[in-house]
Amino acid sequence: MRTALTIAGSDSSGGAGVQADLKTFSALGVYGMSVIVSVTAQNTLGVEGVEDLTPEIIGRQIDAVFKDIPVGAVKIGMVSNSSAIRTIVEKLKNYHPEYVVLDPVMISKSGYDLLKPEAQDTLIRELIPIATVVTPNLFETERLVGHKVETLEEMRQAAEQVFQMGPKSVLIKGGHLKKGPIDVFYDGTDFHQYEGKRVETKNTHGTGCTLSSAIAAYLAKGLNLADAIHEAKIYIQGAIEHSLPIGHGHGPTHHFYRWFSEDE
């Protein structure tokens, strides 16, 4: 059994964060483990509150996993403050996981700041450099590079800028591109585009969490990075196409759509 670890915030509505990551790991046949860094009170309408855990208990969770169970890949999602970031970086540098997929969650769909503004510099200087791949969406990319990113050419330029921050590779998600959902991958040498199909649905809660955890799952299963991203893109496309009209806002994607027939 291959394994993967998510380090992220908890989503009380189950559509994003640690819950989405664990569902994705399970759907893709990987044993999932979790380190919770924050507890959020949220639903499909938005985030109502966040309570951060202490760096001490975050570190002890990481120690508990790595001291007992081999970790095939690590996915990092919402990490809201500098102390938590530094603890995670220190522990991962100590344990040296082969793969680290970083989804730099900064703000919720409802506009709630999930990354404290003063922690952005710590994220850039300390967390991004240890990542195998960083997966920001367009808004997060703009926050990282400090300017608008609205076209494919601007995505390529931004990918080069984020790469200069130290990760091994960058995947900029273009789900909000006007010409259609196209992601841009850059490894310091070559660019590659992953094209998706636009799905007319408001139920996209947790798509970024799900994609990044799917990449981690496929890396844990032994795929190379290019193939892991390709398979993760296929998986998230299907999860969005089968998204669930749950709640009164942005419903979640269907993590287990491959396990259900259309009439269930």
Image (cartoon, rainbow, N blue to C red):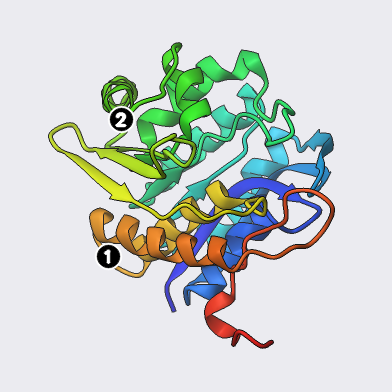
Please tell me how crowded label 2 is: few (under 14), some (14-19), or many (20+) other residues with Cα within 10 Å: some
Left or right position of 232 against 52 = left
Name the amino acid type tagged 2.
Answer: Leu
The residue identified by callout 2 is 152
Which residue is located at x 62 percent, y 38 percent? 78
- Give how far apart the Cα atoms at labels 2 and 1 are: 27 Å
The residue identified by callout 1 is 223
Earlier-in-chain disc, 2 versus 1? 2
* Residue 219: percent from left, percent from top: 34, 61
In the rendered view, would you say 204 is above or below 218? above
SS assignment at label 1: loop
SS assignment at label 2: helix
- Outermost residue on the left side: it is 189
* Residue 3: percent from left, percent from top: 47, 68
Please state which of residues 180 and 74 is positioned toward the viewer in this rendering.
180
* Quadrant for the C terminus in the image: bottom right
Asked if residue 68 can be seen in this view, the reply is no
* Residue 147: percent from left, percent from top: 44, 12
Please state which of residues 63 and 80 is positioned toward the viewer in this rendering.
80
